[in-house]
Image (cartoon, grey):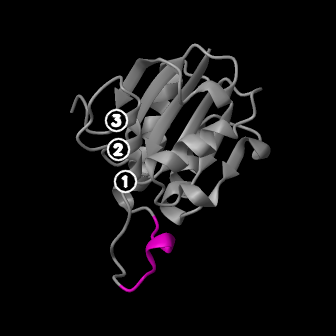
Amino acid sequence: MKSILFIRHAKSSWDSPTQKDFERPLNERGNKDAPMMAKRLMDKKVAIDVFISSPAVRALSTATYFHQAYKAKKDQLITIPVLYHASGDVFYDVIKQIDNKHNTVALFSHNPGITVMVNSLGVAKVDNMPTCSVFGVHADIENWQEFEAAVKQFWMFDYPKLGQ
């Protein structure tokens, strides 16, 4: 069994309109929501083997909050440049490259690609992945190369404003 959590980066700052998109940091709400969502996963006893992120500042900052909350080792946080504004096909290509020793993966990226990706899984319809949302699926597979063709089972969908 392999499980994957698709996590959209937390709320980013637009304070500096001339700042390059790639370099936008998290805003105050993002800096509050990311550790809160990491704690929610930990409270649900979700174990994560590796954290894979877009290298964009807002995505990597979100991943870092999760990585730190889990007290994970340094080598458990990986950046993959193609996850910056990735399309659905790119997500599948990245997933195929995940080391099979990892059973549960957290993958951090951006809209609109991450919403397209979760909808391509065929387990639920999501109009929009809110900032810092977590969408998870399980697949009864032995290796990540089988993920795209595998039948997925819905695991969870959570986001900061859910239940408020």
Report the Cα–Cα distance between label 2 and label 1: 6 Å
Q: Would residue 49 appear left or right of 136 to someone viewing this image?
A: right
Q: Is residue 98 left or right of residue 55?
A: right
Estimate how packed mark 3 is, as few (under 14), some (14 to 19) or many (20 or more) residues with alpha carbons within 10 Å: some
- From the image, tell me which residue sits under label 2: 115
Q: In the rendered structure, which segment of residues is drawn in magenta?
A: 18-25
Contact? badges 2 and 1 (CB < 8 Å): yes
Which quadrant holds residue 70? top right
Whether residue 77 can be seen here: yes
Element type at marker 3?
helix
Horizontal placement of 101 versus 118: left or right?
right
In this view, the residue in front, 149 or 75, is 149
The amino acid type found where label 2 is placed reads: Thr
Q: Residue at x 77, y 46 (%)?
A: 74
Which element is circle 1 on?
loop
Q: Residue at x 41, y 30 (%)?
A: 121
What is the magenta segment's predominant secondary structure? loop
- Residue type at numbered disc 3: Asn
Q: CA distance from mark 2 to mark 3?
A: 6 Å
Identify residue type, mark 1. Answer: Asn
Task: Please provide percent x and percent y for residue 82.
Answer: 58, 58
Residue highlighted by disc 3: 119
Q: Is residue 164 positioned above or below 88 on the image?
A: above
Q: Which residue is mark 1?
A: 111
Q: Choose mark 1 or mark 3, whichever is in front.
A: 3
Q: Percent x, y for residue 31?
A: 44, 54
Query: What residue do we see at 77% from left, 40% from top?
Result: 73
Cβ atoms at labels 1 and 3 below 8 Å apart: no
At a point 48% along the width and 19% down the height, the residue shown is 44
Residue most toward the bottom? 18
Residue 46: image location, x then y, percent: 55, 21
Cβ–Cβ under 8 Å for marks 2 and 3: yes
